[in-house]
Image (cartoon, rainbow, N blue to C red):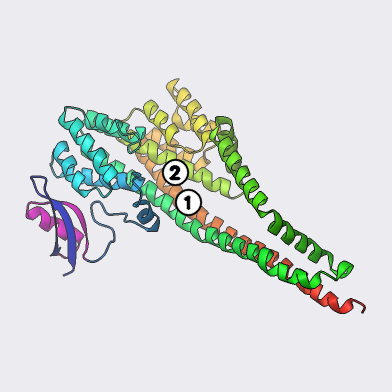
Amino acid sequence: MPLYAYKAAEPTGKVVRGSLEAADERGAAGRLQDMGYIPIQIRPAGKSGPSLTSDLFRYDLSKSLSAIFSRISEADVMRFTQDLAALLSAGLPVDRALSVLIDTAEKPGFKNVIREMLRSVQGGSYLSDAMAKHPKAFSEFYVNMVRAGEAGGVLEAVLERLGIFLENSQELKDYIRSALIYPIFLLFVGGISIIILMTFVIPKFSMIFEDMGGAIPLSTKILLAMSGLLRTYWPIILIGTAGIFLMLAKAIKTPAGRRWFDRVKLDLPVAGETIRRIEVARFARTLGTLTKSGVPILQALSLVQEIIGNRIISGALAGVQKRVKEGDRLSVSLGEIGLFPELAVQMITVGEESGRLDQMLLRVADTYEKSVRTSVKRLISLIEPAMILFMGLVVGFIVISMLMAIFSINEIPF
């Protein structure tokens, strides 16, 4: 039988680590429970793959780099949520579960946050109130979910849903980032190659053509002029480019600038539809998770507006919330703002009519997250050849311009 490494908690709260043989991870979890332990992490020995309870999403390269810094990431909060749900489901009280998680937290900053939460809970505060004191780690959405779970006496179930929500959100983000790595790398390498050609290779040829005068072809003159401009004024070009980017970044941070930028993103030919689907999936999963956890629909819509990244869609949802408050159906209000696909609106309509709005919203999220993956693949399949073609045209122009100048040497009368 395969060997599994585990991390578990004793009934006293002490964390223990070890290994055991079992047929699969569930069998390992059962053996640990028979031994009187509460499983926290289980994975094949010698591997860092997904665990049954809280290691479903392990570090990739970006997470390994971010672990160097003390900032609490979404992945940290996701693992904390899954671990806390597992411990509470096993019967540990909140204060003892938090004391266990202090030892399992990897970042010192997060250890301090959990330690302060433990002190607040031991002082008589609700867990949600203790979390609310740390907005950098726990969002308003997260705190309200926990508060709803406490009010309904279903904190363990709410934390399990939160863990699934955070895991799905993180998975989608990681998929998009991974898909963009190659195009960004291609753009970087291609740009560096062109800069090297323009600043080091072409100047060598320019010395050959110095005495050729009017015999130089027009394309070669343009290329030499661009090379000389880049070599002479590169500090000004660099500072100017950085200044433009800084001005744009500053403008985008203003409300009007952010709305303009978000509108431009939605109007992009192919990427705009992908961005729209991402926001629809985020809206549906957030609202579905909130309503399933017992948060009232109006409060849930208010929280969703903070989660949505696009200000155009977020602003439209404010109008939807107002109309729902006045008695309109959610699906009708969403359909009339014109930003949500017809399929999503129809699925939400079915959910309202059947009394299963929360389940249908989560199904909408699943549908559009799959659609986003397909759209990203299609977008990348268009971007990669377009970038290769562009780089090829630039390099081809450089090579042809140089060859034309070299061939024209034979035409100079002596």
Residue at 14%, 45% in the rendered image:
90
- Where residue 41 appears, x then y in whole percent? 21, 54
Q: Say which amino acid is labelled 2.
A: Ala
Q: Residue 334 at what x, y percent from top left?
A: 49, 33
Name the residue at 73% across, 66% down: 397
Circle 1: residue type: Ser
What is the number of the mark on residue 371? 1
Q: Cβ–Cβ below 8 Å for labels 1 and 2?
A: yes
Measure how far apart labels 1 and 2 are at the Cα level: 9 Å
Percent across and percent down for residue 42 are 20, 57
Vertical position of residue 241 compared to residue 22: above or below: above
In front of the other: 55 or 192? 192
Identity of the residue drawn at 31% across and 56% down: 58
Mark 1 / mark 2, whichever is N-terminal? 2
Which SS class for mark 1? helix
Q: Which mark is residue 44?
A: none
Q: Secondary structure at mark 2?
A: helix
Work out which quarter of the rendered image holds the C terminus and state it. Answer: bottom right
When asked about the image quadrant of residue 115, the answer is top left
Question: Where does label 2 land, which residue?
Answer: 281
Query: Most extreme residue toward the top, as rendered?
Result: 326
Region rendered in magenta: 21-45
The image position of residue 130, as x and y in percent, is 25, 31
Q: Nearer the viewer, residue 340 or 233?
A: 233
